Amino acid sequence: MKILALFLAALLPCLAAGPDVGKGRTMGDPAAPMLFELYSDFVCPGCKHLHENVLPAIILDYAKTGKAYLVFREFPLNIPAHVYARPAAAFAVAAAHIGKYRTVSDALFRNQQSWGLSGKVWETVASVLTPEEQKMVRALATDPAVLAEVQRDVDRGTKAALTQTPTVMITYKLKQQPWTQFGDYSLFRGYIDGLLKK
Amino acid sequence: MVSSKNRILQIAVVFLRVALGGIFIYAGYVKLVEPWQLFAAGIADYEVVPMWAAKLLAHTLPWFEVLVGLLLIAGRWLRTCTVSTSLLLLVFVGLMVRAFAGGKEINCGCFGPNELISWKTLVRDGAMLAVSLFLTAIAFRHRRKPA
């Protein structure tokens, strides 16, 4: 029984990540003991803060050390101020299909204030891609499969009762815990390290 | 001789004291069995105290809740105890109302993580505050007029 539980616990991060997310939106070892699902909205300022100031530390401390498998999930909020969040998510997921997710998401967060207001999402995305990549991403961003991929993330977050972005859904030993407080990274690190010691 | 009305009041007071004490012990216990960082994050989500204060509160508040809960049940230092619970609940309910009215969808932090502030949590904590204020009034009334 204990062996079965251990097997399931080891398997959970892989199952939870699921086949719905391509390799382009993941980081680290899929067999890592912990799963981090990072739900973001490209228009949300808190997500920009997390992406630029906290995420590098999370990658360094957990994804690169094999302690956690990191999955990037889209959660564009359905509010008037975030009208361009969903197209941005579609471009990012499209870019993931050609291995450019991080490049595009970096650009989207870096220029969040300008395209968030002007709506020039494509111009921001295109600025970091070659003409060939631009063609592919532009075509993929309207592909029903890519749009469905974004929607699957949204549905998954809604099902998990997500209330805000950014949220990191932490899955460890069959237990899930959302984490939304990124003002002090040491708090997150202390919590994760404590869990990993258990 | 104690009248039947007074006796019912006395029984009700003891019942409410034990119930409120039990709730406070439970509230402290569920926070203590979870990693303290979860409660600290919950406090920080309210955006009213700096992070260092949230960490300090996360370490101390659950123990304080357990202590006042035990004292309420034991019936010791009742005036101090009931004033403490009333002030605590006043602050908790005030912060919850502020967050709820401001449209914040954050965890209540009342009984461990993952319980969003809602009408239900507001009514529940409001009822606890009413009970606590009642017990405070009784504790001070008994001081002036010993039965």
Image: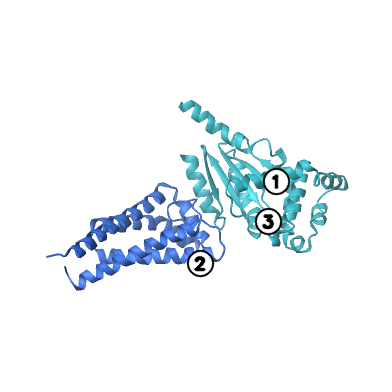
Residues at discs 1 and 2 both on one chain: no
Q: Is residue A108 left or right of residue A65?
A: right
Q: Chain of mark 3?
A: A
Answer yes or no: is residue A50 visible. yes
Residue type indicated by callout 3: Asn
Quarter of the image where one finds residue B140 = bottom left
Q: Colour of chain A?
A: cyan
Residue B122 picture location, percent across and down: 46, 61
Q: Examine the rendered structure and indicate whether residue B77 appears above or below residue A161.
A: below
Residue B101 picture location, percent across and down: 54, 66
Residue A137 picture location, percent across and down: 82, 46
Q: Examine the rendered structure and indicate whether residue B116 appears above or below residue B144.
A: above
Residue type indicated by callout 1: Gln
Real-space CA distance between mark 3 and mark 2, rounded to the nearest whole angstrom: 24 Å
Q: Colour of chain B?
A: blue
| Residue placed under numbered mark 1 in the picture | A151
| Residue placed under numbered mark 2 in the picture | B98
Q: Is residue A25 left or right of residue B146?
A: right
Most distant residue in the bottom direction: B144
Q: Nearer the viewer, residue B147 or A15?
A: B147
Q: Nearer the viewer, residue A58 or A174?
A: A174
Label 1 neighbour load within 10 Å: few <14, some 14-19, many 20+: some
| Residue placed under numbered mark 3 in the picture | A78
Answer yes or no: is residue A59 visible. no
Local SS, label 3? loop
**Residue at position x 70%, y 42% in the image:** A25
Real-space CA distance between mark 1 and mark 3, rounded to the nearest whole angstrom: 12 Å
Local SS, label 2? helix
Residue type indicated by callout 2: Arg
